Amino acid sequence: MDDLIEGDRKYLRTMDIYDSDYEHFEVAGMNLKAQFKDERLLCAINKLSARQKEVLLLSIVERETDSRIAEILTLDRSTVSEHRRKALAQLKKYLEENVDE
């Protein structure tokens, strides 16, 4: 700490992270954890079909490729792409309609 300039010390802090701070999703036998800062986004994700939610979470949370998601969910890669495209369109629509919440 002595090596830090006084101005830099204000940027140092610790933050406790608890498992309860995350939303848990069961996808293809995997437990995915994600933290959402915007409650509207979580609400919008929960309105998606089960398959769209699985594809979206594997894509965004796990950063899996379409090919890998297709393998995990036993789908065609083009089907994965279509599910993600529709999911993102629905999220966008929901968030635009619920701006003031």
Image (cartoon, rainbow, N blue to C red):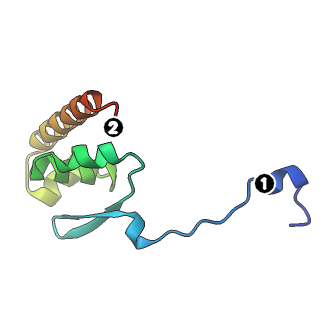
Tell me where residue 74 appears, x and y as whole percent. Answer: 8, 56
Q: Secondary structure at mark 1?
A: loop
In whole angstroms, how far apart are the C-alphas of marks 1 and 2?
33 Å
For the point 86% across and 67% down, the residue is 1
Q: Which mark is residue 10?
A: 1
Q: Which residue is mark 2?
A: 101
Give the residue type at disc 2. Glu
The disc, 1 or 2, on the residue closer to the chain's N-terminal end is 1
Vertical arrangement, residue 82 with respect to residue 96, above or below? below
Q: Quadrant of residue 61?
A: bottom left
Can residue 97 be seen from the camera position used here?
yes
Front residue (pair 67, 101): 101
Instruction: Residue 16: give x, y in percent of width and height.
Output: 56, 70
Give the residue drawn at x 8%, y 51%: 75
Q: Position of residue 66 (x, y in %)?
A: 22, 46
| 48 to 28, vertically: above or below | above
Nearer to us in this view, 43 or 85: 43
Label of residue 82 in the image: none
User: What's the amino acid at mark 1?
Assistant: Lys
